[in-house]
Image (cartoon, coloured by chain):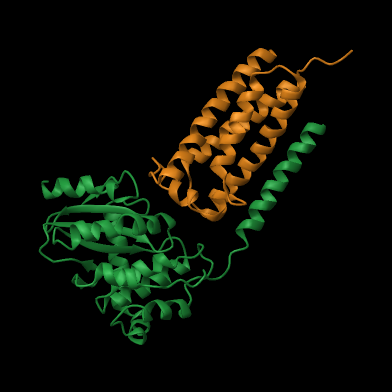
Amino acid sequence: MIVGAIAIAVAAAMITTSILGSSGDSPAPPSTVAGSETTTLLEGIPQRGPAMGTPDAPVTLVEFADLQCPFCREWSQQAFPTVVRDYVRPGKVRLVFRGLHFIGPDSEKALRFALAAGQQQKLWNAVDLLYENQGSENSGWVTDELLREIGGAIPGLDVDQAFADMPTAAVTAQMSAAEDLAVGLSVQETPSFAAGKTGDGLSLVNVSSLTADGIKPALDSLLGQ
Amino acid sequence: MSDRALRVLVGSLATVGAAIAGYLVYTRYTNTRIACATGGCEIVQSSKYAELSGVPVAVLGLAAYLFLLATALSASELARAAGAIVAVAGAAFSLYLVYLQVAVIDAICQWCVISDVVMCLLAVACVLRVARAPRPT
């Protein structure tokens, strides 16, 4: 009897702690914004909509991601810079962002902003900065204020135009196209990656880790290295 | 079922649970992708419910399983009582975690569900150990 009472008390304390811990999210993360590293990393690399890198790169790598997904953020921070430096900048790989928004409303708002920035060929700058400023899931962290700060940190981006483009049919069509591609490739989680020779079909890539080493073997294999 | 048989059962279940929890701890701290047939493992593991006061739930689970494994090595009344407290509390918390996966996070982590089932079985075994303990006459 005493054993049961103690056990229930311990479980109740754990559940209470979990509930209290999960409800204490701040609506927005501490404002970090920054952006100079992103600008330096991407400077001079051609962007066109969701794609980055020379269009005739021999290999195309597609990233499926939700901008609220913490593992996507990890990949962006740990692997993305190396992939850009070693594969995209030298013209070996063309990187395409296919954003999904299954986690919640903040995912969709962030994605619409990124795609709107893509209309001005700045999608990857926006994506990298959104990850850098990522808040708790569905806490309302994707505020207009944050988006304006991020937009302001992207050289050459017309922030007002980006806001105007967010609800447009063109942006919605890109979101639908990403979903269709994800369904077609049976993407089940984020981040997921698909790669192939540019112009040929795409196949899902099994990524062993969220560091650059996790994706390098697949890229090297496609490049014949 | 004898206490000896229950101790073997508790030890076996705790070993399975520790292996699962250890795997989740490993993937968390090495940034390794979780092998996942249900497609929701990383969503669950990256959710805000995957930590309790800053401590990953997988770490708490690993600690609980190792503790239960230790209690299986002893036939003492203290070991039986301590094992029952940890296992029943763990089972109750596991049911809460299953509820979160189904109703709140809307994603299923296969490893978490298997661990939850193992913890519930451990609770039954540990309570049986207490219930079947010899009474002082």
Q: Is residue B50 left or right of residue A161?
A: right
Q: Residue at x 64, y 52 (%)?
A: A18
Q: Nearer the viewer, residue A72 or A190?
A: A72
Indicate the position of residue B61 as horizontal and vertical percent values: 58, 38
- Above or below — where is A8 with respect to A212? above
Indicate the position of residue B21 as horizontal and vertical percent values: 51, 36
- Above or below — where is B21 with respect to A59? above
Q: Colour of chain A?
A: green
- Above or below — where is A112 with respect to A157? above
Q: Residue at x 28, y 53 (%)?
A: A193
User: Does the rendering let one see residue B1?
Assistant: no
Q: Quadrant of residue B67?
A: top right
Task: Provide the letter of the chain coloured orange.
Answer: B
Indicate the position of residue B94 as horizontal and vertical percent values: 61, 41
User: Does the rendering let one see residue B71?
Assistant: yes
Q: Quadrant of residue A3?
A: top right
The residue at the far right in this view is B137
Q: Is residue A183 left or right of residue A93?
A: right
